[in-house]
């Protein structure tokens, strides 16, 4: 994918690095920010319940990739004021808003079938 790369941190975890479009709202000469963190999850229903209902995050959008057999769910704690506005947006419009956002998003990635895999460790 264009604008996407990975780095291996010292503890052996892969970090996904995403390109963000410039945004005139943030003019602090910030070279980068931690805009997105991805966590692999075993069961998306349980994970969404935890992050949304227990931690108070809001689900912004989701996508299901048939070819890759995985789903992604994007959550944020910074969208409360925009949530009603986002409900009326298409998936493409939601993605565009996320890509120009300075605020961080949590990406939950579910590889299909892991909910039944007793050996799944998330990495």
Image (spheres, grey):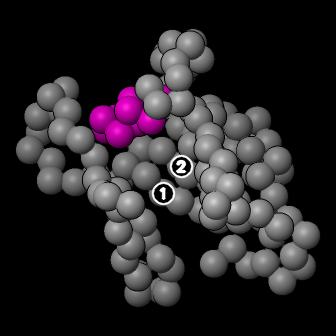
| Residue 94 left/right relative to 68 | left
Residue 117 sits in which quadrant?
Answer: bottom right
The reply to whether residue 86 is in sight is no
Residue at image mark 1: 37
Q: Is residue 26 left or right of residue 15?
A: left
Q: Residue at x 8, y 44 (%)?
A: 29
Image quadrant holding the C terminus, namely bottom right
Q: Main secondary structure of the magenta part?
A: helix
Query: Does the residue at mark 2 contact the one at mark 1 (Cβ under 8 Å)?
Result: yes
Pointer 2 or 1: first along the chain? 1
> Is the N terminus in the top left, top right, bottom left or bottom right quadrant?
bottom left
Over which residues does the magenta segment extend? 94-103
The reply to whether residue 59 is in sight is: yes
Residue displayed at 84% across by 83% down: 119
Q: Position of residue 82 (x, y in %)?
A: 48, 17
Q: CA distance from mark 2 to mark 1?
A: 5 Å
Identify the residue at the far front of this view.
67
Residue to which mark 2 is pinned: 106
Does dot 2 land on a helix, a strand or a loop?
strand
Q: Based on the picture, tell me whether residue 63 belongs to the magenta stretch.
A: no
| Residue at image point 59% right, 17% down | 87
The picture places residue 85, in percent across and down from the top left corner, at 51, 13
Q: Nearer the viewer, residue 30 or 18?
A: 18
């Amino acid at each position: 994918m264009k604008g996407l790369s990975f780095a291996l941190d010292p503890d052996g975890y892969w970090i996904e690095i995403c390109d963000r479009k410039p945004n005139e709202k943030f003019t602090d000469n910030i070279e980068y920010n931690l805009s997105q963190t991805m966590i692999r999850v075993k069961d998306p229903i349980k994970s969404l319940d935890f992050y949304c209902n227990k931690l108070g995050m809001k689900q912004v959008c989701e996508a299901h990739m048939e070819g890759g057999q995985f789903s992604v769910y994007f959550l944020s704690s910074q969208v409360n004021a925009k949530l009603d506005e986002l409900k009326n947006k298409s998936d493409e419009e939601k993605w565009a808003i996320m890509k120009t956002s300075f605020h961080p998003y949590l990406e939950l990635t579910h590889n299909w079938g892991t909910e039944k895999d007793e050996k799944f460790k998330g990495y």
